[in-house]
Image: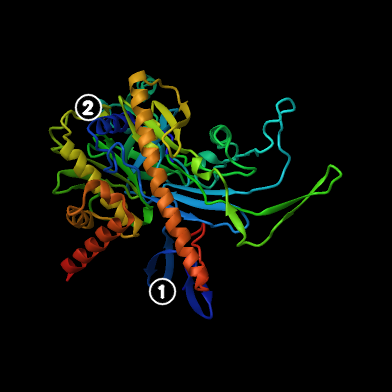
Amino acid sequence: MPSLISPAERDYILKGIDCNIRADGRQRPDYREVILETGVISQTSGSARIRLAGGTDVLVSVKADIGPVLVDPETGEGADKGQIICNVECAPSASQQFEGRGADELNNELTQMMTRFLSHNTTSLSTSSTSSTPASNSNGAGGINLIPKTEVQDLGDGNFDFEVLDDAEDTEVVEGREDMPICVTLNKIGARHIVDASPLEELCTEAKLVVAVNRSGELCGLQKGQDGGIEPSLLLEMIQFGKTLGQTLIKQLDAKIKAEADADMIKRQNGQPVVKLGFFAQ
Amino acid sequence: MRGHGTYIENEKVVSSVAGVVDRVNKLISVRPLHTRYTGEIGDVVVGRITEVAQKRWKVDVSARQDAILMLSSINLPGGVQRRKQESDELQMRSFFMEGDLVVAEVQAFFGDGAYSLHTRSLKYGKLRNGSFISVPPALVQRCKSHFHSLACGVDVILGLNGYIWVSAHVPQNLDEIDTELVYSNKNKEDITPRDRESIARVGNCIRALADEFIFINDTIISFAYEASLQYKLKDMNKKEIMHAIATEATTAVDNMKG
């Protein structure tokens, strides 16, 4: 990943974006091919690998655990809500800049952002968690989440005992998964904005806007990054664009995830093994 | 005989890396695909200035250490021939700044193995009017020329270090070059959207070839360009289309060789 760019390259990229031809032939609203596979880690409640045309590789996993709930002592609210703890890490092997403590800043930024976007939009989630993560370049995607059914037993003396059924088949999809937001990052370069910036385009970026939208097109979060400013009129345009793109992406992702789940189901019913490509596949 | 990148198993020489087989008489070695650039004197390389130091620039050429471009091995603007003075040393950033892309030639090695570069020819110098692509260094082979003008109006510089510069065509007449503008940062004004499309298309062709680990030279780039014309520019980032273009280009080259 380069960390420097020459004035001539910057000028070329800027003017290219102005006439809607980017360095790799894409137009401003085009993003690269997304490759998605779910269920790559068997020990988790849900996992996915998302890859953006060889540029960015993301491995997401969700682990549902039983823990205390935070109940408001006055109102008694929150008894039916769990909490989400997010952690984003960039592999030091991905770039020289990430070596040592180099990735700390980016890790913190992404972790904070994920936590904020997810924990404030999950009021409907029943004691569990779900995930969606922004790739370092652009779009996020949610893993498929199945939590084991749990039986809770009241022991009568104020204590509870619970039993987690360890049958892999006996799981259910988390309630409220469909309300999860998806993050779309828009980069403002010159007077225009683009999605899925390449490393060199990232170096020309004046300001970045992360737009989180859910299925119904509601804005769930907004974060501006980097030093530059955004004009109010452009901001509205970017939000609108992020919303439209986010909704389309959610639709496409849902269709793909469902198709994959159905294919796996048919294989299982026929007694064939379900083979996953896994994280190390090229 | 067993060379680098090989080992012997059951009395047979086996490759220990994925790469290109090199044979010198009985010595068999394998050059890995994913490796740092190892240069030779006279190589044309494309590099990026990373640091301005005492009388020298450090240049990233994707080698094990940064190459060095000495102030004494560049041409002064206007083509004046004289010893470099302190005043030149003070305005080094007006020649090359951090981040600038340069094309240069490997002139010598330093004691610690770092490359010393030079740009003492009008062919070499600062790069403008185009975009930068990086491929594995093993895919660019040494040939007569590394500066190519393709029929589609695009210039390509194939750096032996795997850095490639694709730019809009600038008519080259070495006698008439405005030597004052050698260090300018300004792109030419008349790059048309059509030029940009061709540059992007050639860039995508090179990426497609590199993705399939095919040797990159001007012939195969031209064939890949021809093959790519049937696809839309923005579809060229798709894996199957990249594969189709690379396959078609290799078949065309094979047919030409007969």
Q: In the displayed structure, does residue A173 sit left or right of residue B44?
A: right
Residue A25: x, y in percent? 26, 43
- Residue B195 found in image quarter: top left
Q: Secondary structure at mark 1?
A: loop
Q: Is residue B146 above or below residue A75?
A: below
Foreground tag (2 vs 1) = 2
Q: Amino acid at mark 1?
A: Lys
Read off the residue under disc 2: B181
Mark before the other along the chain sequence, 2 or 1: 1
Tag on residue B26?
A: 1
**Viewer can see residue B36:** yes
Task: Determine the residue located farthest toward the front in the rendered image.
Answer: A156
- Residue B253 found in image quarter: bottom left
Q: Nearer the viewer, residue A19 or A213?
A: A213
- Residue B155 found in image quarter: top left
- Dot 1: within a 10 Å radius of its alpha carbon, few (fewer than 14), some, or many (20 or more) residues? few
Please name the residue shown 28% across and 56% down the image: B241
